[in-house]
Image (cartoon, grey):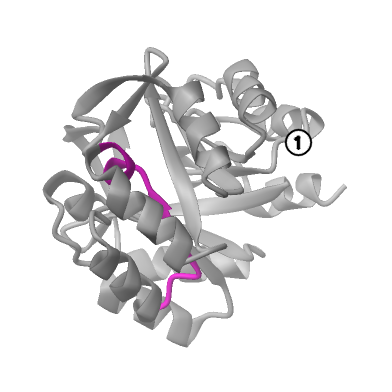
Amino acid sequence: MILFPAIDVLQGRAVRLYKGDKKQVTDYGDPLEFAEKWVEAGAEWLHVVDLSGAFSGESGIDSLLTEIKKRFRVKVQSGGGLRRIVDIRRRLDAGADRVVIGTMAALDPDEFALATYEFPEKIVAGIDAKDGRFAVQGWTYTTDISAVEFGKKCKHMGIRCALFTDIAKDGAMEGANIDGTERMQRETGLQIIASGGVSSLQDVRLLHERGIYGAVLGKSIYTGAVDLREALGECRR
């Protein structure tokens, strides 16, 4: 299982939100310092999210991605604020190895289809679930389609990997939705990266045992509840 240490960026700072609420923010500091910390712990991937872009649609982390790739030998998965093909191209040119797309799929499905065609292997479907429904625009809008049905649609379009976030779990340190994550992977046929609520080494172990493709670690590694180096070791067993 691949672990993706998260660096969520809001107005140039590394932050964590509580259940996606931009009014409940914890500021941790310089994103580059955390990139260095997670890479030194052994991370092969970073999950870098432009929260400003997710909320407003205007991206602002391109220079950060370029600096991360310049300084560290690490692959970067990035999301937030990617609403058009030109946004995706710019993010990839800045240094992202692949990008997470969610809102575009709901609001502009034709553009989303074109993106999957133009950037094969570079698109990760962002499946954010609120009460089982697919949520977009920084989780501020919930669609009528179920998260599972959206995942099946993505698989049909040729997408292989998806980031699945249970919004009710994100940043809450209440444990991951392990059964829901396993169901998403089983029913959609996608390689699922679990996100939201991973709060202990036991969560990591259970996801690994269930055959989940990957997991994003956020608040748990910032607070020290999970030691990233130890978690990476568990996933290599």
Asked if 129 appears above or below 232 in the picture, the reply is above
* Residue toward you, 130 or 152: 152
**Mark 1: which amino acid?**
His
* Residue toward you, 52 or 15: 52
Give the crowd class for mark 1: few <14, some 14-19, many >=20 residues within 10 Å.
some
Residue 143 x/y as whole percent: 27, 23
* Residue toward you, 95 or 44: 95
Asked if 102 appears above or below 11 in the picture, the reply is above
Residue 98 x/y as whole percent: 48, 64
Residue 46 x/y as whole percent: 51, 61
- The residue drawn where x is 22% and y is 48% is 54
Residue corresponding to mark 1 = 208
Question: Which residue range is magenta in the image?
Answer: 95-106
Callout 1: helix, strand or loop?
Answer: helix
92 relative position to 215: left or right: left
- The residue drawn where x is 38% and y is 59% is 115
85 relative position to 208: left or right: left
* Residue toward you, 85 or 29: 85
